[in-house]
C-alpha cells in the first residue's frame, strides 16, 4: 500500500518522448507483506503491484499533470490475471504495462510480470476514467487529452481481450433504437 501511495501521490518524472502506446516498465521487489501462508506472492498483492505499475505508466506519459486540472481519475472496471509461476520473497519483478486499445467506455491494458527473464504472470485491466461527481469520462476523450489532442485510433484489441471484455459486459456496445 505504501508503494501505491508513493507512486500516486509522489509520481516519478515523466519520460521524455513516452507515447501513449509505448510500454512502461516498473521494477519492484517482493516483500514479506506480499506473501501468503504458502510463502509465495498472494493474488491480492499482484493486483496491488499492478496498481503501482499503472500509476507509474500514468507518470511516464505525464498523465497526472494532464488529468488533475479536469478532475479526472482512473478506476478499474475489471481485471484478470493468469499466473504461470510463483514469485517468492526477495524476487525482483519487472512489470511491463502497455495500452492495448480502447473503446467508448474503457481503456484496455496488459501488464506482464517477469522475473529472471521468465514470464510469471499476465494481467489484463479494463480501466475507466471518472470526473467530478463520479461522472464517466469517455475513453476517447482521455486518450485525446493524453495525446495532446493528436487524433489517435485504437489499435485492434487482441481477440482474447475483446472476448473477455464482451463476456464481462464492459466493452462498448451500441444502444439499439
Image (cartoon, rainbow, N blue to C red):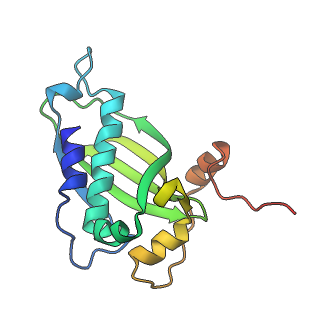
Q: Is residue 124 above or below residue 63?
A: above
In the rendered view, does 87 fall on the left or right side of 83?
Answer: left
Residue 74 spot, x, y in % from top left = 42, 55
Residue 98 spot, x, y in % from top left = 38, 60
Residue at 66% from the left image edge and 43% from the top image edge: 167
> In this orientation, which residue lies closer to the viewer: 117 or 103?
103
In the rendered view, does 87 fall on the left or right side of 78?
Answer: left
Quadrant of the drawing holding the C terminus = bottom right
State whether residue 93 appears in this view: no
Residue at 40% from the left image edge and 64% from the top image edge: 71
> In this orientation, which residue lies closer to the viewer: 34 or 83?
34
Toward the right, the furthest residue is 177
Residue at 47% from the left image edge and 60% from the top image edge: 132
Quadrant of the drawing holding the N terminus = top left
Residue at 34% from the left image edge and 72% from the top image edge: 66
In the rendered view, does 37 fall on the left or right side of 146?
Answer: left
Amino acid at each position: 500500500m505504501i508503494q501505491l501511495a508513493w507512486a500516486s501521490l509522489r509520481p516519478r518524472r515523466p519520460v521524455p518522448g513516452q507515447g501513449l502506446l509505448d510500454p512502461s516498465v516498473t521494477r519492484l521487489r517482493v516483500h514479506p507483506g506480499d506473501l501468503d501462508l504458502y510463502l509465495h506472492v498472494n493474488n491480492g498483492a499482484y493486483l496491488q503491484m499492478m496498481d503501482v505499475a499503472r500509476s507509474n505508466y500514468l507518470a511516464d506519459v505525464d498523465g497526472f499533470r494532464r488529468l488533475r486540472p479536469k478532475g479526472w481519475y482512473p478506476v478499474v472496471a475489471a481485471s484478470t490475471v493468469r499466473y504461470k509461476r510463483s514469485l517468492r520473497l526477495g524476487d525482483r519483478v519487472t512489470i511491463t504495462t502497455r495500452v492495448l486499445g480502447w473503446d467508448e467506455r474503457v481503456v484496455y491494458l496488459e501488464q506482464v510480470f517477469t522475473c529472471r527473464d521468465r514470464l510469471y504472470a499476465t494481467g489484463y485491466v479494463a480501466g475507466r476514467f471518472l470526473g467530478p461527481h463520479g461522472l464517466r469520462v469517455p475513453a476517447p476523450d482521455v486518450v485525446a487529452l493524453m495525446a495532446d489532442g493528436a487524433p489517435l485510433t485504437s489499435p485492434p484489441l487482441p481477440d482474447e481481450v475483446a472476448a473477455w471484455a464482451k463476456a464481462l459486459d464492459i466493452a462498448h456496445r451500441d444502444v439499439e433504437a
